[in-house]
Amino acid sequence: MPVTFKNNPVKISGKELNIGDFAPEVALVGKDLSVSKIGGAKGVYQIINVVPSLDTGVCATQTRKFNQKAASLSNAQVYVVSMDLPFAQGRFCATEGIENLSVWSDFRNKDFGQNYGVLLADGPLEGLLSRAVFVIDPDGKIVYKEICAEITNEPDYEAPIQAIK
């Protein structure tokens, strides 16, 4: 799928995942430096909200909107994944009042980016993650996927929620 940043083509690398594929389980670092795994079968739905950096306006808006939507979900865990350092993620959550979802960093090994096919391989944001949303069902299958064609655009907010209803 072609992806652009400010209308300029960029390449994304890693294994492309599609609806129906098993979502790989990957270890990520939390804002308190704990390590946890997301993906795979968890017995609940998982909404994985992927952003290049919480330090940008679009990423911050996307995270705030998913935080609001997560408050009404009783059958899902909602995550934000970026390459931001855990300290910056913690500061962002404290400043913005983000309490209904958890933030995770892929900065150590880029395993999430590689295993979910969203690692930016070139362009000004090379090494960060492309903007995307994945929904994983309780059995670990991907039931929704959106990789934003233009990184500076927000994703669809309603479709991921509808995928778990």
Image: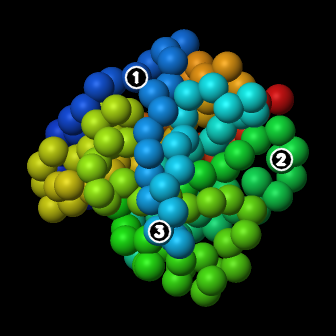
- The percent coordinates of residue 41 (x first, y second) are 63, 26
Q: Callout 1: 10 Å neighbours few (<14), some, many (20+)?
A: some
Q: Secondary structure at mark 3?
A: loop
Instruction: Left or right? Give the position of 63 relative to 17.
Output: right
Q: Amino acid at mark 2?
A: Leu
Q: Which residue is found at the position 87% from the left and 45% from the top?
A: 74
Instruction: Left or right? Give the position of 134 relative to 114.
Output: right
Q: Residue furthest front?
A: 34
Numbered mark located on residue 33 in the image: 3
- The percent coordinates of residue 95 (x first, y second) are 61, 86
Ranked by sequence position, the earlier of labels 3 and 2 is 3
Instruction: Left or right? Give the position of 67 relative to 32.
Output: right
Q: Which residue is found at the position 52% from the left and 83% from the top?
A: 91
Numbered mark located on residue 73 in the image: 2
Q: Amino acid at mark 1?
A: Leu
Q: Which residue is found at the position 64% from the left and 67% from the top?
A: 64
Residue under label 1 = 17
Q: Quadrant of the N terminus?
A: top left
Q: Which residue is found at the position 23% from the left and 38% from the top?
A: 12
Q: Residue furthest bottom?
A: 95
Q: Which-is-in-front pick, marks 3 and 1? A: 3
- The percent coordinates of residue 140 (x first, y second) are 61, 23
